[in-house]
């Protein structure tokens, strides 16, 4: 599982570096509609969520004890619910919490981010990869991580990694759709 999660994030990083990082800012800030996100807004959304998760994951790592036995990862019911919501295969749209919506923090009609967002996004993915590497000796089922919405609900570290991968894949697909719309509108 750990290598699959690590490799998924590596594939996303390479896609961003090879396909997105070289695009002009007007393309990356293009919004297909006023209430739709640009490529950079998708990245900023994931960074906002990381700002919530990151301190908890770091804290849990400092408290985690080495696993006595190699327990296989078991998803929790909360984790499975989150996985469904953020899965790239889920067609249903779920509302984004206000504090996680980048268009609410900026001008909702216009995306005005710069290349720094891409660098931060890559750094965030690499940090999650470093967490995955550190997890080899930890029981993924025992380390609890609070969810991004409330501290009253948590899931395990394995759920966190699966949610990270699925959520990033979901928004990578969204970024690709935005770019396809940009190209279609450019040729009209």
Image (tube, rainbow, N blue to C red):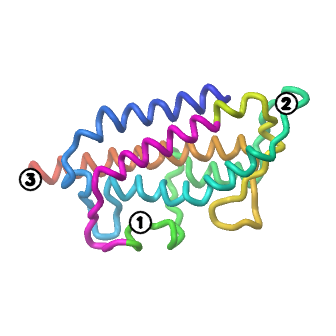
Earlier along the polypeptide chain: callout 2 or callout 1?
Answer: 2
Q: Which residue is mark 3?
A: 188
Q: Could you say which is closer to the camera, residue 171 or residue 142?
A: 142
Q: Nearer the viewer, mark 3 or mark 2?
A: 2
Count the labels in the image. 3
| Vertical relation: 98 (above or below) 117 | below
- Helix, strand or loop at label 3? It is loop
Q: State the image coordinates of residue 133 (x, y, percent, origin top left).
A: 64, 30
Q: Residue furthest front?
A: 62
Q: Nearer the viewer, mark 3 or mark 1?
A: 1
Q: Could you say which is closer to the camera, residue 87 or residue 24?
A: 24
In three-dimensional space, the C-alpha distance between marks 3 and 1, rounded to whole angstroms, equals 29 Å
**Magenta: main secondary structure:** helix
Q: State the image coordinates of residue 39 (x, y, percent, origin top left).
A: 33, 52
Q: Residue furthest left?
A: 188
Query: Residue 71: which disc?
Result: 2
In three-dimensional space, the C-alpha distance between marks 2 and 1, rounded to whole angstroms, equals 38 Å
Q: State the image coordinates of residue 18 (x, y, percent, origin top left).
A: 30, 32
Q: Residue at x 43, y 47 (%)?
A: 121
Earlier along the polypeptide chain: callout 3 or callout 1?
Answer: 1
Packing grade of label 1 (10 A; few <14, some 14-19, many >=20) is many
Q: Residue furthest right?
A: 68
- Magenta span includes 114: yes
Span highlighted in magenta in the image:
106-131
Q: Residue at x 48, y 55 (%)?
A: 47
Packing grade of label 3 (10 A; few <14, some 14-19, many >=20) is few
Q: Residue at x 35, y 61 (%)?
A: 37
Q: Residue at x 70, y 45 (%)?
A: 159
In three-dimensional space, the C-alpha distance between marks 3 and 2, rounded to whole angstroms, equals 56 Å
Q: State the image coordinates of residue 91 (x, y, percent, origin top left).
A: 49, 52
Q: Which residue is mark 1?
A: 102
- Helix, strand or loop at label 1? It is helix
């Amino acid at each position: 599982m750990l290598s699959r999660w690590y490799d998924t994030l590596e594939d996303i990083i390479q896609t961003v570096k090879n396909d997105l990082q070289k695009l002009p800012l007007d393309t990356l800030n293009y919004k297909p509609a006023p209430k739709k996100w640009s490529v950079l807004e998708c990245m900023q959304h994931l960074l906002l969520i990381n700002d919530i998760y990151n301190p908890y994951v770091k804290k849990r790592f400092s408290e985690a004890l080495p696993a006595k036995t190699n327990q296989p990862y078991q998803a929790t019911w909360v984790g499975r619910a989150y996985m469904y919501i953020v899965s790239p295969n889920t067609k249903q749209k779920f509302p984004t919490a206000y504090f996680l919506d980048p268009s609410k923090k900026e001008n909702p009609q216009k995306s005005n981010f710069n290349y720094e967002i891409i660098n931060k996004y890559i750094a965030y993915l690499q940090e999650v990869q470093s967490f995955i590497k550190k997890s080899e000796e930890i029981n993924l089922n025992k380390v609890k991580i609070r969810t991004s919405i409330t501290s009253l609900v948590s899931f395990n570290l394995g759920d966190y990694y699966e949610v990270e991968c699925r959520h990033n894949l979901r928004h990578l697909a969204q970024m690709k759709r935005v770019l396809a719309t940009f190209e279609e509108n450019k040729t009209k």
